[in-house]
Amino acid sequence: MNIELILFIILATIAAVTSILVITRSNAVISAVFLVLNFFALAGLYLLLNAQFISVVQIIVYAGAIMVLFLFVIMLLRTDGEPRIFSDKRYIKYFALLISIFVFIQVSYLLLIGSPSKSVTGNQSASINSGTIETIGKELYTNYIIPFEVAGFLLLAATIGAIILAKKKFE
Amino acid sequence: MSLLETVIFAVIKMLVIVVVMFLTVAYSVYFERKISAWAQNRMGPNRVGYRGLLQPFADVFKLLVKEDIVPDAAHKPLHTLAPFIALFVAFATYAVVPFGPSINLFGYDVKLVVADVNIGILYVLALTSLGVYGITFAGWSSGSKYSLMGGIRSSAQMISYEVSMGFSIAGVLLLSESLRPIEIVNAQYGWMWNAVLQPIGFITFVVSAFAETNRLPFDLPEAEPELVGGYHTEYSSFKFAAFFLAEYANMIIASCLIVTLYLGGWQIPYIDKLGLGETLTVILQVGAFIFKVVFMLFFFIWVRWSIPRFRYDQLMNIGWKVMFPLSLVNILWVAVLIMIFNL
């Protein structure tokens, strides 16, 4: 058994266990903490796939920025009533069940019928190079320049929209 | 170098750095108390050891033997975890800071940095963005209003200043064309220090560093008159010591980063023209790095005892309406440097 496989098993276990804990904890802050742990395990898995840039960005953006904002909001809100949602309103339960069955069917379809990607057996040095920040930067600013700029423009629009909505409320 | 040798060298470097870091952190507390005494015309600690030199050890020992109090309303696992996160983040960042060029030691070519990784600067950004968790968890898990307010203030503050910090670093990266800290230092050969080439970026980075380390004039998360002790109100004994040490460790890291990114790292301008021996040059360069870091530490402490605290709205205004636009101006300026002066 080589070291990559051992690391993969450890990280995948952490990812699976923490993602279950995220949805089973009744305290929203604790769920958020496990979600952060889950992001770390994911970042480790990206590193195993030689995607260093994606791995670090996963930590900077998701664990470092987005989850801090999540926690920020959860701490400011009173979440005492959250645990009662599932015991009070039973129809939510059935709705959740329906959605989970739907997602389960989709995932099992992909796993059973969809064929695994053929590119897994590519040579290793090429895959190390394709994960570096230089390669990603070059690709983003040459081949994918239009999607990249459109995404940036959309985010800018969303930011301006959020600011205008917030300002209206205060005035 | 074989795998075993690489691992052994890495372990030795880590041990050296952890020991040196603990000592520097302990003595920066002493340094701070002495400078504050100087600023306020007092004596400062002078009882334990010669001129109070053993004072930091006495302080840490006192904190260790105190009772560890966990409030009833606290969330215990997180309450315990928070100080560890704070310390871990502070110490882990040092792995990518180069404190000298390579040196020839017992026939091996040793790089004076623990981990020479090609995404070093991103690693630093990732860790600093995690540093906020220590404080946020501490604030929330204590189950106290003052702690919670401190934690929330700090997360808002750190997120706001991370933006201008990131954009100031972008200016440095544009000039050095690498994310590897050693390359960034090499790019600042002679007097081509980034502080000279992009003074605006230097100022925004230093101000953001003050805000990120929660130092005065930006120490709103633990503003005593309003929040008792802020996020560490409910901490005692060694957990309090951990936060205390983490604050100073962060200050040292911030100084190291300022020196590496803007003040030429270990570079002494044109030292290679003097024709000194190789080992002597390296020793002088490591000395220069330490000197610059100590100077920045002195600057941090000097500011703390000279400038009063900002109000919270002023802090946010400076972050978003002054520092952020200035860091963008800096990127434009660097682009001008590259396009017109071909740097």
Image (cartoon, helix red, strand yellow):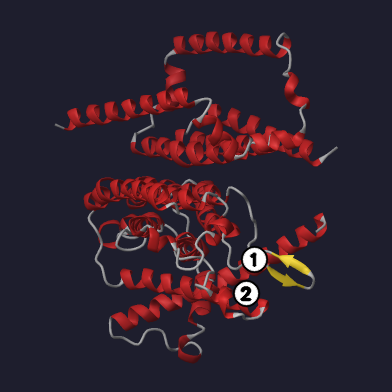
Seen as rendered, the residue at the extreme left is: A171
Q: Residue at x 43, y 78 (%)?
A: B31
The chain ID associated with circle 2 is B
Other residues around mark 1 within 10 Å, as few (<14) / some (14–19) / many (≥20): some
Question: Which is more toward the observer, A27 or B136?
Answer: B136
The answer for how far apart the CA atoms under marks 2 and 1 are is 10 Å
Residue B286 locus on image (x, y percent):
58, 73
Q: Tell me whether the residue at label 2 lies in contact with that at label 1, contact meaning CB atoms closer than 8 angstroms.
A: yes
> Residue A45, can we see it?
no
Mark 2 belongs to which amino acid?
Val
Q: Residue at x 49, y 9 (%)?
A: A95
Q: What x and y, as percent, mark residue B42? A: 31, 86
Q: Using the rendered image of the protein, determine whether residue A41 is visible from the camera's viewpoint.
A: yes
Q: Looking at numbered disc 1 in the image, what kind of residue is underneath it?
A: Leu
Q: Quadrant of the N terminus of chain B?
A: bottom right
Task: Look at the numbered disc 1 and give the secondary structure of its residue.
Answer: loop
Are the residues under marks 2 and 1 on the same chain?
yes
Q: Position of residue B74 (x, y in %)?
A: 45, 48
Residue drawn 44% across the image and 89% down it: B47
Residue nearer the viewer, B98 or B139: B98
Which residue position is annotated with label 2? B282
> Residue A127: percent from the left, percent from the top?
70, 33
The image quarter containing residue B3 is bottom right
B243 left or right of B211? right
Instruction: Write down the residue under mark 1.
Output: B112
The quadrant of the rendering that contains the C terminus of chain B is bottom left
* Comes first in the chain, label 2 or label 1: 1
Q: Secondary structure at mark 2?
A: helix
Mark in front: 2 vs 1: 2
Q: Which mark is residue B209?
A: none
* Up/down of B52 relative to A49, above or below: below
